[in-house]
Amino acid sequence: MGFAALSGYLLTAFEVPKAISKEKPNEFAKAIFFVIPFIILLGWTVLYFGIKTFVNYNNARIHRLKLREEVKKAQLNTLKGHVNAKFMARTLNCIKELMLVDVKKSRLMLTELSELLRYSLTKNTVDTVELNEELEMVRIFIDLTNLDKPFNLFVDPNKDESILHLGIPPMLLLNFVELCSKELWLGDKPSEMHITLENGMLFFEVEGGNQNISEKEGNLIRKSIEQRLWLLYGHNALLKNGLRNGRHVWAMMIPSIIQNEITTVV
């Protein structure tokens, strides 16, 4: 109001109203007195509510992102690899039967099972582990699986050192090998799991025989791996199966992670 009165006074002092309207200069001053406060009030109101709306929208967006992040973390914690309960039961039964025949081997298998369980529990709170650690657990898993049924998968330990020290989500490769044990018939000859690094992507591939075994349990494992890959990497990861020269193949592709690098959830 003071600014409007001052404006009206100055305009009147410089005879601007007379230059615009010689007949009714006072009416022009009165119009300025009311119009200018209205413009200022309108502009201030628009600015105030505009800023307030923007701040509220931004806070709501941040809150939604936090909730989405918490949901993703909860989903990842649910999907993190665990030792399959059925696998545990079958392995313990096999070790129990083995004790009647070979006590030394049964003790060794029991030790390996305890190592696998300890790995599953202790690595459940970390984002990445070194590939060589995961490969050691895969070797133990294959040894224990062979107690129940033949699973002739060979993991070549002579890999490039740079690959062995790359990071990988814990239990992911082990779950992939478990999926292969449910879906692939390897035959009498042992098959090798190929691990390659190309353009910053890690490729894991297992080639089976010309027959295919598809268990209901394998479908659940596949869905769990796919959901976990999607939450971790989005479109940058892949899990697929197909035929090559008449042989069934399962492959998994993930971005390579330097150990101790923070894993970003997409």
Image: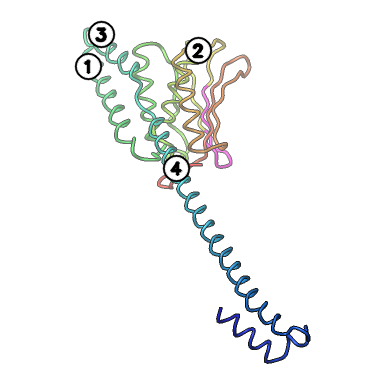
Magenta residue span: 196-206
The residue at which mark 4 appears reads as: 69
Q: Nearer the viewer, mark 3 or mark 4?
A: 4
Q: Which badge, 4 or 2, comes first in the chain's sequence?
A: 4
Q: Name which residue type carries label 1.
A: Lys
Q: Report the residue at 50% width, 41% height from top.
A: 256
Is 204 magenta? The answer is yes
Dot 3: element: helix
Disc 2 marks a residue whose amino acid type is Ser
Q: Which mark is residue 73?
A: none
Q: Please, is residue 200 above or below residue 157 in the view?
A: below
Q: On the image, which quarter does residue 13 sit in?
A: bottom right
Q: Give me the C-alpha separation between circle 1 and circle 4.
A: 48 Å
In the rendered image, residue 84, in percent from the top left (x then y), is placed at 36, 21
Q: Earlier in the sequence, mark 2 or mark 1?
A: 1
Name the residue that disc number 3 marks. Answer: 97
* Farthest-out residue, bottom: 13
Of residue 242 and residue 125, the one placed in the foreground of this image is 125
Task: Name the residue tied to disc 1.
Answer: 104
Decide if residue 158 is on the left or right side of residue 51.
Answer: left
Is the magenta region chiefly helix, strand or loop?
strand
Comparing labels 1 and 4, the label whose residue is closer to the camera: 4
Estimate how packed mark 4 is, as few (under 14), some (14 to 19) or many (20 or more) residues with alpha carbons within 10 Å.
some
Residue type at the position of mark 4: Glu
Q: Give the quadrant of the N terminus.
A: bottom right
Please report whichever mark, 1 or 4, sits nearer to the chain's N-terminal start. Answer: 4
Amino acid type of the residue tagged 3 in the rendering = Glu
The residue tagged with tag 4: helix, strand or loop? Answer: helix
Which residue is disc 2 drawn over?
214
Q: Quadrant of residue 94?
A: top left
